[in-house]
Image (cartoon, grey):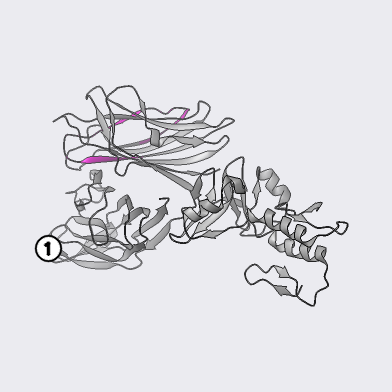
Amino acid sequence: MTTLSTINGIPRPDGTDPKNLVDQFAAFDAVADTRCAPRFFNAAARDLAITTPVEGMMAYLQSEALQMYYDGTAWVVMDQYRLQKLTSNLVVTTTTQVTIPEFTISLKANSTYLVEYNINLLPSPFAGVFNTAVFRLTGPDDSTLNNFFMLPSRTSGASGNTAMQWGTSTTSGENSAITFGNTGSAIYQNGRWFAIVTTVGTPGSLQASLSRSTSVTSVTMAATQSFVRWNKLT
Amino acid sequence: MTDYSAINGLPLPEDDDIINFNEAFGGYAQAIDSRLHPRYSTTTDRDAAITPAAGRTPGMQASTGNTPQMFFDNNVWDDWGAWTYVRKGTNEAKAATGAIAADSALLFGCFPNSMYEVEAVLMPFATGTAGLTGFTFNFLYGGVKNIDRTVMGPAPGSTNYENYAMSSRLWPAATDTTVGHPGTASESIIVEARAIFSTVASTTFNVFWGASTALGGAFMTMHSASYIRWRRLQP
């Protein structure tokens, strides 16, 4: 057992070693076992198996769908994200909230997510009428939503000189709907919406929905550059 | 085969086993196979090898080489998606000609048939004696203006770095973005732009920028703190 593999330093037998399969397997495994990408049901199972973690080790937690690594001090979540785009322009003609299918996110129980929406609203087809939309997020009833938004005002200007509205709210399950708008100019207004959603005992989904305000007969979300992206934090 | 490794549960022969080398080694190899980080040329090759029949399960990992990406199974193949940052590093001045030109540092190479997400935080300021002028920029790949982008920044025409309206809108690819008037170095404006775009050929993404109008003797300067960051999305 005097030879080590080049990359991982795994011991391998050479011709002078005694032919003891058990010992050779054990020596090989003592290193190889620590260089794999193991999977565990949860953090408790991980900690039971990896009693002395070393910086750089990885572990996947099946119950939480989290990929983690050990940074020398603690197990931390690896940057994992997902992005979904609007696939075609979404025209909404009703004052009732319409779910945006591409913006639906599946949520695990007992988890926290950081979610960011990039929303583009087409110009109003109605001359002189502000094209106002109502954007709403809905999570599981027992979840907590912290919302932060930076959106063009519902009466934002025509030339790109935009009055902004921004703020935050914390509610259970469903946030307060926010209205933002556009004018009859050729400009597509852009809004940013951030949410931190924390679930408890049951999994569910975070849904985004859109409706028109009563001042117009329709609003349209542009497919181009409208997307949602999110990271699972815990 | 009654003993198992501590972390991954890999089967190990024991002294009291009747040791069959092929059986012992084969069992170990089969168990460790799904715990490694395999490399493939393409996602097609990955999916041909890691199938449900082969024991595909959440937590497994893989990399692809043709468009270098790292994945892990999260019921779907999730991309690790780490951002790559390109920092400006040093100030760069351009004469205020009214035209835009490629930044010397804010660029990256793109693989063909790929989708990218890019964000830019640009901090221009003005120098010279001819006064201030608006800041204009665009995203190009392959030297062509073909990327729609959303931009937040001071509204065009704004001249004060403290009190001005904002511009938050989508800009069509062919139209250069113009925002407010940069101040001096200590009053750089900040513009944030983002885009998702797809490539066909192997090419380069560039930030082009300049002053919105020609002002003899004046310069627009991109502050060294400006940066872009990008990551490749799943096709």
Query: Viewed as shown, does residue B172 lie left or right of B5?
Result: left
The residue that appears at 19% across and 37% down in the rendered structure is: A157
Q: Nearer the viewer, residue A25 or A84?
A: A25
Q: Is residue A181 left or right of residue A9?
A: left
Which residue is rendered at x = 77% and y = 58% of the image? Answer: B24
Residue lying at 65% horizontally and 43% vertically, measured from the top left: A42
- Taking the image as shown, residue B18 lies to the left or right of residue B113, namely right
Q: Report how many numbered discs are placed on residues in the image.
A: 1
Label 1, secondary structure: give it: strand
- B83 vs A205: above or below: below
**Relative to B83, does residue A23 appear above or below in the rendering?**
below
Q: Percent position (x, y) of residue A116?
A: 40, 41
Judged left or right of residue B128, residue A67 is right
Asked if residue A94 can be seen in this view, the reply is yes
The answer to which quarter of the image holds residue B184 is bottom left
Q: Residue at x 25, y 43 (%)?
A: B169
Residue B207 image offset from top left, x and y in percent: 28, 60
Kindly identify which residue carries mark 1: B215
